[in-house]
Amino acid sequence: MAGSSHGHTPAAWTGVIIAFIGFLVSGAFMVMAQPVGFWVGMGVVLLGGVVGGIMRMMGMGQKNEHPVHQVAAKGAPAGAKG
């Protein structure tokens, strides 16, 4: 996907970092055989998705201005000007 800005937004970075921390927490507690801590970590993973989605709705996500994301006119082939 050369030339794409896929995922290079504050919303994407924040959501992924929070989810990554949740996976680290879950993994550590899984090794320590502590189910409650594991599920808390999984909750943090879900929180990352929620935070990323909220930030996207606040305008910090990717804008749909990239030509790949443009919808072609009805009946026109993809990429056709119309």
Image: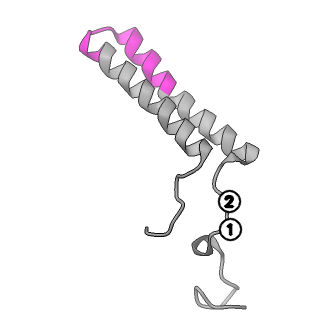
Number of the label disc, if any, that sits on residue 17:
none
Asked if residue 36 lies in the magenta stretch, the reply is yes
Name above or below for residue 74 compared with residue 18. below
Looking at the rendered image, the quarter that the C terminus falls into is bottom right
SS type, badge 1: loop
Q: Which stretch is magenta?
A: 30-44
Gap in angstroms between the C-alphas marked 1 and 2: 6 Å
Instruction: Count residues near mark 2 (Cα–Cα under 10 Å), then give few for <14, some for 14-19, many for 20+.
Output: few
| 40 to the left or right of 82 | left
- The reply to whether the C-beta atoms of the residues labelled 1 and 2 are less than 8 Å apart is yes
Asked if residue 33 lies in the magenta stretch, the reply is yes
Instruction: Count residues near mark 1 (Cα–Cα under 10 Å), then give few for <14, some for 14-19, many for 20+.
Output: few
- Look at the magenta stretch and give its main secondary structure: helix
The image quarter containing residue 11 is top right
| 31 to the left or right of 40 | left
Q: Amino acid at mark 2?
A: Lys
Q: According to the image, label 2 marks what residue?
A: 63
Q: Residue at x 44, y 25 (%)?
A: 22
> Percent from the top left, x then y, of residue 23?
38, 27
Looking at the rendered image, the quarter that the N terminus falls into is bottom left
The image quarter containing residue 75 is bottom right
SS type, badge 2: loop
Name above or below for residue 5 compared with residue 36. below
The image quarter containing residue 68 is bottom right
Q: Residue at x 42, y 17 (%)?
A: 39
Q: Amino acid at mark 1?
A: Glu
